[in-house]
């Protein structure tokens, strides 16, 4: 028994070396059947739902709901124990100089290139947003007419980012559900992509402004912001609804700074900030993070950070504003949707 314990013992140095190895370089070196898929991912040729993210140095096996580094890969794909996986990686590396994975520095174009093949019709995206996502039809039609929403040749929704009328970025949202085994992320049922843009615009996002942006509302995705607007159109005024494409603190800070500058030019002040993120662990942690900071106007008045997240139904671990909108539409008793069409 003692000899087995000694055999299984791994040092801290061995663990660090194994945990931080470049996962793609290592897996290819031991002959794992991985095939490149796009600029950021490799897919396993024998396990369709297993993908390796080369920019973030981890794998995701969606059908088994497993993700992690090279050690976790060996444990799950080849049924090794933790100690054996660590030992194997160190043995495979041998005396080779160990270079820990380092995420590449981001690069930015000098100018945003709108490389989207727009469709002549928006029928598919309107059907998706209205029929499936339950967003008000007149709201969607208005945003299409204002060139904020378009459809591309792959039937994706194109959400355009605009700054004072100038197109500075865009993100794409698929309208057809991806089979589980083909997903890059297990919980991401639809294709999503943010088009590369300038360094200045990278931390911007899709936004809707009504009047002056005296009241800021932050969301994780454009569909969440449109859902919230559908539910609250009669009460939202002098506001900006900003999509952060996730939980991007940098987008939050930049949006607040830009709003303050624009309001100062108009002789107005920022009055409120409301976080309307998903009701899940990550969303609640983001709220706590933002609320840990103090925000003050130049006149010394403190800006209170509010949160408005939908109640989490029993048995659910995550709930966003589109979930809430669909639930209210399907349950008329809960529905409290304004009929006002102004935007």
Image: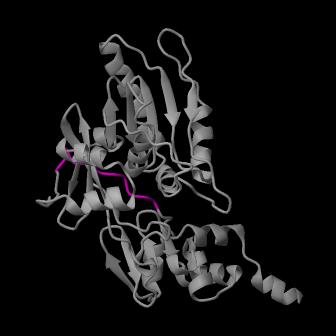
- Bounds of the magenta span? 102-113
| Residue 317 against residue 259 in the figure, above or below | below
For the point 50% across and 42% down, the residue is 336
Whether residue 196 is visible to the viewer of this picture, yes or no, is: no
Q: Residue furthest left?
A: 120
- Tell me if I can see residue 170 in this picture: yes
Image coordinates for residue 343, horizontal then vertical, percent: 30, 34
Which residue is found at the position 34% from the left and 52% from the top? 106
Main SS of residues in magenta = loop
User: Is 104 on the left-hand or right-hand side of 330?
Assistant: left
Question: Which is more toward the observer, 56 or 67?
Answer: 67
Q: Quadrant of residue 19?
A: bottom right
x, y percent for residue 254: 39, 33
Q: Is residue 18 magenta?
A: no
Locate the N terminus by quadrant: bottom right
Q: Position of residue 165 (x, y in %)?
A: 19, 34
Quarter assignment of residue 305: top right
Residue sitting at x 35%, y 27% = 258
**Residue sitting at the far right:** 1
Q: Is residue 126 left or right of residue 327?
A: left
Residue 18 versus residue 339 in the image, above or below: below
Q: Residue at x 51, y 70 (%)?
A: 98
Residue furthest front as drawn: 333
Please state the horizontal and vertical placement of residue 249, each as a whole percent of the image: 48, 40
Vertical relation: 316 (above or below) 84: above
Colouring convention used in this rendered image of the protein: one colour
Viewer-proximal residue among 114 and 216? 216
Is residue 238 found left or right of 335 in the rendered image? left
């Amino acid at each position: 028994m003692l000899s087995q314990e000694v055999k299984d013992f791994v040092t801290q140095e061995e663990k660090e070396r194994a945990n931080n190895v470049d996962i793609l370089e290592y897996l290819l070196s031991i002959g794992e059947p991985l095939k490149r898929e796009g600029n950021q991912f490799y897919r396993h040729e024998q396990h369709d739902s297993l993908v390796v993210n080369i920019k973030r140095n981890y794998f995701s096996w969606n059908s088994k709901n497993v993700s992690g580094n090279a050690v976790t890969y060996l444990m799950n794909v080849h049924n090794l124990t933790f100690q054996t996986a660590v030992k194997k990686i160190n043995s495979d590396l041998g005396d080779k100089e160990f270079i820990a994975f380092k995420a590449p520095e981001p690069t930015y174009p000098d100018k945003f290139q709108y490389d989207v093949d727009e469709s002549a019709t928006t029928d598919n995206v309107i059907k998706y947003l209205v029929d499936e996502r339950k967003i008000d039809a007149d709201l969607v039609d208005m945003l299409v007419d204002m060139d904020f929403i378009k459809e591309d040749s792959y039937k994706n929704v194109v959400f355009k980012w605009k700054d004072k009328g100038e197109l500075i970025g865009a993100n794409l949202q698929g309208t057809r559900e991806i089979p589980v085994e083909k997903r890059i992320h297990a919980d991401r049922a639809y294709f999503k992509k943010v088009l590369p843009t300038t360094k200045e615009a990278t931390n911007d996002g899709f936004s809707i402004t009504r009047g002056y942006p005296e009241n800021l509302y932050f969301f994780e995705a454009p569909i969440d912001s449109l859902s919230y607007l559908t539910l609250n159109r009669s009460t939202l005024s002098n506001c900006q609804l900003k999509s952060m494409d996730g939980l991007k603190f940098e987008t939050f800070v930049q949006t607040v700074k830009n709003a303050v500058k624009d309001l100062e030019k108009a002789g107005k002040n920022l009055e409120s900030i409301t976080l309307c993120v998903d009701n899940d662990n990550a969303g609640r942690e983001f709220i706590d993070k933002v609320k840990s900071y103090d925000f003050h106007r130049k006149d010394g008045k403190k800006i209170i950070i509010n949160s408005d997240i939908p109640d989490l139904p029993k048995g659910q671990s995550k709930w966003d504003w589109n979930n809430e909108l669909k639930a209210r539409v399907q349950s008329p008793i809960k529905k409290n949707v304004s009929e006002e069409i102004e935007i």
